[in-house]
Amino acid sequence: MKIHKNITKFISVFLTAALLLGSLTATAFAAARTEHGMIDILASDSDSAFVAKHKDAMDAFREGAFDLDEQIDLYSYSIKTTEIRSLFVAARACYPELFFMNLGYSYGYTSKNGVYYVTYIAPTYTVSSKNELNVMLEKFYAKADEYLSLVDDSMNDFTKAIVLHDAIVLNSEYYVTKDGREGTPYTLMVEGWGKCEDYTRAYAYLLAQAGIKSEIIDSDSMGHEWMKINLGGKYYEVDVTWDDPVSYSDSLDSPGRITHRYFLFSDGAFQNHYGYSSVNTSNDTTFDEYTLHNMKSQFCMVNGALYCIYSASGSTNLVTYTAANEMTAVFDIGTAVTNEGGFWASHWSAGGGSYYPAGYANLGTHDGLFYYNMPKAVYVYDAASNANVKLADYSGANQLFGMKITDGKVYGNDAESPNNSGTLKYVCDCLKMGDVDNDGVLNVVDATKIQKRLAELENFDAVNTIKADFDRDGIISINDATAIQREIAR
């Protein structure tokens, strides 16, 4: 980290201002009711043509459901009794916020010229009052907003899709039922657990809010649900559920781990699935051979660039990645960690002196810094200064196969091997930028200590050197002390 004593530096200030102005042009997305046509469905009893034809009936069904109507009037929409199942299935799929409905329903009908038409549908609900529903909807939308805060309209659709995909996978666990309840898009979004249907529909909901269309595929022959997403007017296969690694020893997934094995494929390349077809055929092979399918760490968007950890041929690197499959190495993690701590600091032991050929480092970000796990430690990397620091050793009996950041804290996936599900264990807090007196609070003492460091009256260790760069411009200067004072004066 460079130390700069001048009060001003024109180029630094200009670049910082440019970055700030650039960020003001990006618009964040906010959770709302799903716009009709953003989510489509292909299932054994519903299809795209039905969804398009009966928009008004589907909207009426949704509005009646939100009012918890005992009977939703469908008389004027000419829905045949042979179509009521299609309407019900399509509405629940295309509007994931209807998570509060059971699968059961009844309906009334009348005859016109020998044809039977539905007069009303009577759904069954999992909530008993509007107040209960409103509380759940508020939590659903609030959690969706947390996910949507990771993307904005300055990103291309590829970047939005992969960032949201990774966030869902990293923060969810596969359960069909839990605590006597069956999973729903609500449990997946708010509580972080659910089944394939819930993974798919929660992800489809987030994509819709970010302006990306998708098609849900419900396969009877597989007893499984996945999706296709629309990028640039072309559809690609995605199975967000199967990208959440599941251990071989039990049915639970491996927290803190992530894959991209089933993300953005053509129909031909999507050979692990069977028994499906689609209205929107995925013939485009653009992404079939992309390197991303071999990446097992989270993709993170920082300062306009997409980052990931790439492990191959015994090397582990922090890289930038683009929608054109362009990858650029930023920092050689494996070499840095090996040079500091030796061979076993950067290699996952398989016992008996052997090691796993693959790397299991996951990536996370907090306050513009990168965090990653090694087998027995968590590191922090500052791209602005190229500083790499071991943040905490892990003293658990097992190794860390992946990690995640939640509420400013780093949790590692403690597991006996990559084939076991493991358990998330707290490892350390993320760095609190500017808190150079390490009391957990940003205050004037921190600004004063930075000023003393500039006057060479104070020494900072490697961690505090990173934290002192409060304005994130790659240098420690009086501007950092000033920025802290402005922050605490708010």
Image (tube, rainbow, N blue to C red):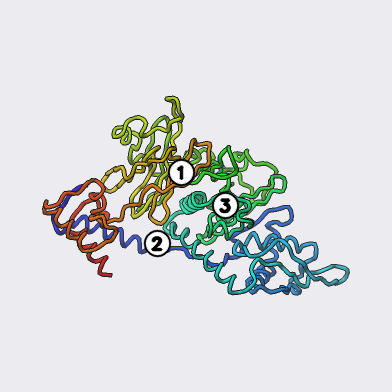
Query: Is residue 280 or residue 129 the one in the foreground?
Result: 129
Is 368 situated left or right of 454 in this image?
Answer: right
**Image position, residue 416 (x, y; %):** 48, 36
- In the figure, residue 63 lies in which quadrant? bottom right
- Badge 1: residue crowd in 10 Å (few <14, some 14–19, many ≥20): many
Q: Which of marks 3 and 1 is in front?
A: 1
Q: Disc 3 on helix, strand or loop?
A: strand
Q: How far apart are marks 3 and 1 (CA)?
A: 30 Å
The kind of residue on which mark 3 rests is: Ile
- Badge 3: residue crowd in 10 Å (few <14, some 14–19, many ≥20): many
Q: Earlier in the sequence, mark 1 or mark 2?
A: 2
Q: Which of marks 1 and 2 is in front?
A: 1
Q: How far apart are marks 1 and 2 (CA)?
A: 34 Å
The kind of residue on which mark 1 rests is: Asn
**Residue at horizontal 66 percent and vertical 56 percent from the top:** 41
Mark carried by residue 229: 3
Mark carried by residue 104: none
Total labels: the figure holds 3
Residue receiving disc 1: 413
Is 321 situated left or right of 7 in this image?
Answer: right
Q: How far apart are marks 2 and 3 (CA)?
A: 23 Å
Residue receiving disc 2: 26
